[in-house]
């Protein structure tokens, strides 16, 4: 069962600083940017499984 709750470390950068931290936070929340409408939009994530054996 999937939960509607998520936790991720968020950070804010000063102008001119790297945007990598913000991208990682958006990815953790399964959000993407719509540059035309200038809003956040849900994205599909990839399920990662580990096979033992």
Image (cartoon, rainbow, N blue to C red):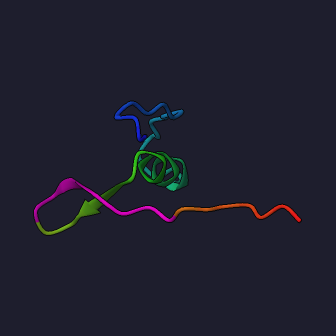
Q: Which residue in the rendered view is the most extreme toward the right? A: 53
Instruction: Look at the image and give the residue range highlighted in magenta.
Output: 37-46
> Which of the 4 image quadrants contains residue 5?
top left
For the point 47% across and 40% down, the residue is 13
For the point 32% across and 61% down, the residue is 43
Q: Position of residue 6 (x, y in %)?
A: 43, 33
Q: Position of residue 3 (x, y in %)?
A: 40, 35
Residue 42 is inside the magenta segment:
yes
11 sits to left or right of 32: right
For the point 54% across and 33% down, the residue is 9
47 sits to left or right of 14: right
Most foreground residue, 16 or 31: 31
Residue 14 is inside the magenta segment:
no
> Which of the 4 image quadrants contains residue 48?
bottom right
For the point 54% across and 55% down, the residue is 20
Most foreground residue, 47 or 40: 47
Q: Main secondary structure of the magenta part?
A: loop
Most foreground residue, 6 or 32: 6
């Amino acid at each position: 069962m999937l939960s509607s709750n998520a936790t991720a470390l968020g950070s804010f950068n000063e102008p001119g600083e790297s945007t990598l931290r913000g991208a990682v936070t958006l990815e953790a929340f399964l959000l993407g940017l719509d540059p035309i409408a200038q809003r956040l939009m849900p994205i599909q994530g990839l399920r990662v499984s580990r096979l033992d054996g």
